[in-house]
Amino acid sequence: MSRDAGVIRDAAGLTRLAGEIAVLEDRHGPCPTLIAARLIVTAALAREESRGGHFRADFPAADAVGVRAFVTLESADPAVRHAAE
């Protein structure tokens, strides 16, 4: 989490981290820590700008107007999303 979802982040690192979280969930189940990590990564990937204390190295500018993004467990979890389809 510190390396790929820390203060300085980019899509490549966040995507790599999402894969690592998926592997850990496959091995150990969806424990609260991994669920929280997945929600953080999903929200960080959705925000394609630098805002507040987090800097997207691949999107260094802040948008003129901030836009709220809402991430739910269902939208962040591929297994839940596919089961609902």
Image (cartoon, rainbow, N blue to C red):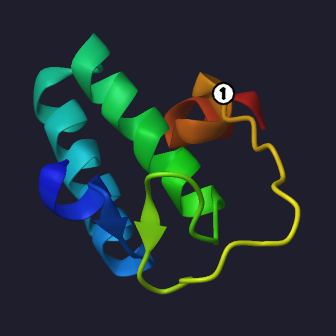
Determine if residue 69 is in view: yes
Q: Which quadrant holds residue 82?
A: top right
Q: Which quadrant holds residue 57?
A: bottom left
Question: Which is more toward the observer, 46 or 19?
Answer: 46
Mark 1 residue crowding within 10 angstroms, few (<14) / some (14–19) / many (20+)? few
Q: Which quadrant holds residue 61?
A: bottom right
Residue 35, given in percent of the width and then of the height, sits at 37, 24
Determine if residue 31 is in view: no
Side (left or right) of 72 relative to 20 = right
Q: Which residue is mark 1?
A: 72
Q: Residue at x 52, y 36 (%)?
A: 77
Q: Amino acid at mark 1?
A: Thr
| Screen quadrant of the C terminus | top right
Q: Residue at x 34, y 55 (%)?
A: 18
The answer to whether 74 is drawn above or below residue 24 in the figure is: above
Residue 78, given in percent of the width and then of the height, sits at 54, 43
